[in-house]
Amino acid sequence: MSADVLTQTASPVVKQPRKDPLGASGRWLVLLSMLIGLVSHGWNMFRYPLYLTDEGIYMEQAWAVLRMAKLSPYTYFYDHAPMGWLAIAGWVSILPGGFDAFGNALNTGRALMLIVHLASVFLMFEIVRRFSGSMPAAFLATFVYNLSPLGVYYQRQVLLDNLMMFWILLGLYLLARKDGRIVTAMGAGVCFGLALVTKENALFLLPGCAYLLHRTVKEQSNRRFGVSFWWFSMLAPVVGYLLFAQIKNELFPQNFNFNLESTTPGDHVSLLYTVWWQLHRNSNTSTGLSFSYLLKESWLFKDKYILIAGVAVTLLCLFAGRNNKRLRPPMFAMALMAAGYGFYLTRSALLDFYIAPMVPLFAMNLGMFFGWLTRRTKQPGAAVLVACLLVPVLVMPGGFLVKYNTKGELEFSDAYRLPLTQLQEEQVAWIKANIPTNARIIIDDDVWVALHDNDPPYKYAHSHYKATSDPDVRDKIFHMSWENVDYVVMSNKMRDALERGGETWIIEAIDQHGETVWEATRGDVSLSIIKIGTTSS
């Protein structure tokens, strides 16, 4: 017997990956989905919603990366892993106009969020199509993802949550390819690791992703290598982050002091102390809000359809498809991810934008359940059913697109017509025209880059939070005294933040020694600038 014959006899039979072409109709649906996303998220995105404090924080940290070669313009205390604003800094660095490429820093960040959203639309379409085998299901998922008012509101904003979900979707897409290659499994692992060092709450999606990995590579001959390299690649960015902290001697607190009652646990910041503090946050012990409060006062008001339908299909996906070997694993995995993140939302102190990742998670669950429900329905019939589901929420008042105003007239939803950020632009313009650059100013972070990325900069303009918590600002610039403050620039609802955070000396400076010199109001949005040094009556 020849050597060639022996080789052929001994070689194992490797199952070839199943080809899953998109096809011409699929390409048109993907393009249509991305076009809908471009319009729904791009139209009016520089004017609505109002610039958020956290948007300003991430842009100022990206500014510090490019201008100061630091992770923060202040002491970096590991409140979040830095991958998110490193990505933002990379985006700004390639733009001819830098931070002002799209008018101002926050607009430039929102332009990146639009690109991230469009890429996420493509990834979601392919994830749902490949796992469910249904293009109508994929279109349904992306349509809801594109037009959900809750999604439009938060996914326009410069948030780490949106960047985190991009990495999660990219990792799921690589698993959905099922090409049997080790490098694909490694890439999927790296994506999840990057999600973790973008925002740590991606950890609650790990059980669903790990389960999907196991079931996806189960029938591959190299499954042990695939799983092992996924975990290795996933941990690499996390270990790199821990190593960074250790090199700076900031991994552990001084003397291993994890006492949360101590305001100064050591002479340096600590990654693990901050993690320990984050794990013990709740709505009773921090400035965050409770799940029930945000659900009733914010999220259901913005979009009750995606929340109610999302919870329903997530529960159904946990139990549906038990007799379908192909659909059961991805359906269960998608439901497990939504349930895991939902558990996080119910257990932690929250800010309102923490809900943002639930929109793509619910959209994927909706698509997977629809694909399972219509698995014996021909594609044209499923497409008609999709149209029947979507038309009501598009045309009915109070749905995705239109509403009645106070006069009873039909008009587009706020996201497509209100120019709220114009007030903040007017506020910054007044500051630059009337306040000298050497003034000591307490601000909110939404205007931080606008005041510091100037020549000359307002180098004594600092966040109200830093003015009360960072010793370098609190004790060296303001000394917790109204006499060392020239102006307080009030953002919308900044007064509430001052009261929740116990920033009493700033409140006293405003109430007892302040005079309003500029003010603008639109609806329930109110901004002002207060000059300190005048005794109020």
Image (cartoon, grey):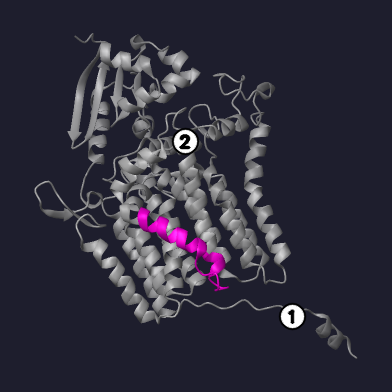
Q: Position of residue 238 (x, y in %)?
A: 63, 44
Numbered label tally: 2
Going 18% across and 37% down the picture, which residue do you hit?
Answer: 523
Range of magenta residues = 307-331
Q: Quadrant of residue 502?
A: top left
Q: Which residue is mark 2?
A: 61
Given residues 477 and 212, the one toward you in this image is 212
Q: Is residue 287 above or below residue 39?
A: above
Give x and y (percent) for residue 168.
52, 55
Residue 3 percent location from the top left of the image: 88, 86
- Rendering coords of residue 213 (x, y %): 62, 62
Compared across the picture, whether 448 is left or right of 391 comes to right
Place residue 378 in its image quadrant. bottom left
CA separation, marks 2 and 1? 53 Å
Q: Amino acid at mark 2?
A: Gln
Label 1, on which residue? 13
Residue 329 included in the magenta stretch of the image? yes
107 vs 395, nearest the viewer: 395
> Which quarter of the figure has residue 439?
top left
Q: Considering the image in quadrants, where does the C terminus appear? A: top left
Left or right, 10 with reference to 33: right
Badge 2 crowding class, 10 Å Cα cut-off, few under 14, some 14 to 19, many 20 or more, is: many
Going 41% across and 58% down the picture, which residue do you hit? 312
- Is 346 situated left or right of 508 in this image? right
Instruction: Name which residue lies at 27% across and 22% down.
Output: 435
Disc 1 residue type (three-letter): Val
Q: Is residue 104 above or below residue 335?
A: above
Magenta-highlighted stretch: main secondary structure? helix
Tell me the residue at 28%/71% (across/down).
388
